[in-house]
């Protein structure tokens, strides 16, 4: 009998412990997502660790990049303090999962808006335009997709480049990697004839890495990059839409560009051209869906 009561006591203690943890760390069902974030004291934003100049960790272990600067502005407007942001490192293929699992509040990891992704997450107003590009080694520069026939093309898993070539060129041999650093090392090692990724990333990478050229500068449809929140989180989505509009009107997005992207692109990219970072595309008369 004593043993039975002892077992019951242990089970009861475990239940009470779980309930106390839920009460302390969980979100009250009547509590809004923004209230929950403010109660926590930080906003969790998913960014890349290896995709300069958009999101990366420098030699001192500090998050840097265009997306990071925008994330700081979001924290500043939400808390009055740009340091109230917790950067959560993600990979391209894990961005949706991290939102669905509540590991982050917002994804700001160079996230291209696609119809397939819209079914899984909610995108806020975009803050940059983007298309696909292809970079290859000087001397054997790929200038047309047909030149890749019989050759290996390097892509990152879960990216728009992966989806585009898998759908439109099913017979092409794709060499896929989880991390950007792995993909670019494979290109340098000659394991693939070229690498496909967002052209905004490739322009900067080619400037930094002499001996490589973005031979295909625009491929497929022109898309937009936008922050994303968990599907159905309308309150946070509406707040974020207003925030992106505000940052654009105040010139904060332009400031982020000048600080992080302009030095990386140099004179190779006209800021008023393919990137169009002055205002969110959805606010312009020439906007595309």
Image: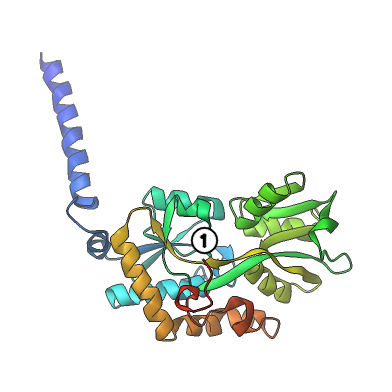
**Extreme front residue here?**
285
Q: Residue at x 37, y 70 (%)?
A: 241
Q: Nearer the viewer, residue 62 or 184?
A: 184
Quarter occupied by residue 44: bottom left
Judge from the rendering whether residue 21 lies leftward or rightward of residue 238; answer left or right: left
Q: Residue at x 19, y 28 (%)?
A: 11
Residue 9 in sight from this viewpoint: yes
Q: Residue at x 47, y 71 (%)?
A: 68
Say above or below: 186 vs 82: above
Judge from the rendering whether residue 27 lies leftward or rightward of residue 229; answer left or right: left
Q: Nearer the viewer, residue 19 or 248?
A: 248
Say above or below: 256 vs 59: below
Q: Residue at x 10, y 13 (%)?
A: 1
Q: Position of residue 186 (x, y in %)?
A: 74, 55
Judge from the rendering whether residue 144 lies leftward or rightward of residue 42; answer left or right: right
**Extreme top residue here?**
1
């Amino acid at each position: 009998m004593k043993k039975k009561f002892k077992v019951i006591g242990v089970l009861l203690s475990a239940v009470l412990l779980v309930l106390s943890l839920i009460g302390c760390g969980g979100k009250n069902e009547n509590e809004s997502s923004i209230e929950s974030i403010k109660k926590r004291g930080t906003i969790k934003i998913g960014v890349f660790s290896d995709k300069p100049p958009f999101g990366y960790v420098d030699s001192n272990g500090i998050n840097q990049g265009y997306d990071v600067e925008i994330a700081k502005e979001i924290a500043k407007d939400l808390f009055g303090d740009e340091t109230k942001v917790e950067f959560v490192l993600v990979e391209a293929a894990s961005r949706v999962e991290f939102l669905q699992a509540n590991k982050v509040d917002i994804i700001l990891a160079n996230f291209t808006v696609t119809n397939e992704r819209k079914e899984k997450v909610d995108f806020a107003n975009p803050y940059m335009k983007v298309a696909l590009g292809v970079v290859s080694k000087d001397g054997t520069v790929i200038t047309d997709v047909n030149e890749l026939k019989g050759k290996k093309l390097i892509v990152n898993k879960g990216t728009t480049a992966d989806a585009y070539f898998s759908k439109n060129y099913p017979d092409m041999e794709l060499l896929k990697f989880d991390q950007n650093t792995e993909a670019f090392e494979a290109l340098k090692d000659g394991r693939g004839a070229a690498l496909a990724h967002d052209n905004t990333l490739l322009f900067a990478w080619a400037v930094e890495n002499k001996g490589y050229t973005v031979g295909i500068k625009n491929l497929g449809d022109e898309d937009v990059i936008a922050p994303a929140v968990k599907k159905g989180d309308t309150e946070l989505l509406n707040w974020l839409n207003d925030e992106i509009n505000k940052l654009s009107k105040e010139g904060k997005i332009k400031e982020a560009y000048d600080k992080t992207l302009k030095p990386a692109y140099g004179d190779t990219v006209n800021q008023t051209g393919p990137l169009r970072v002055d205002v969110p595309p959805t606010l312009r008369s020439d906007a595309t869906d």
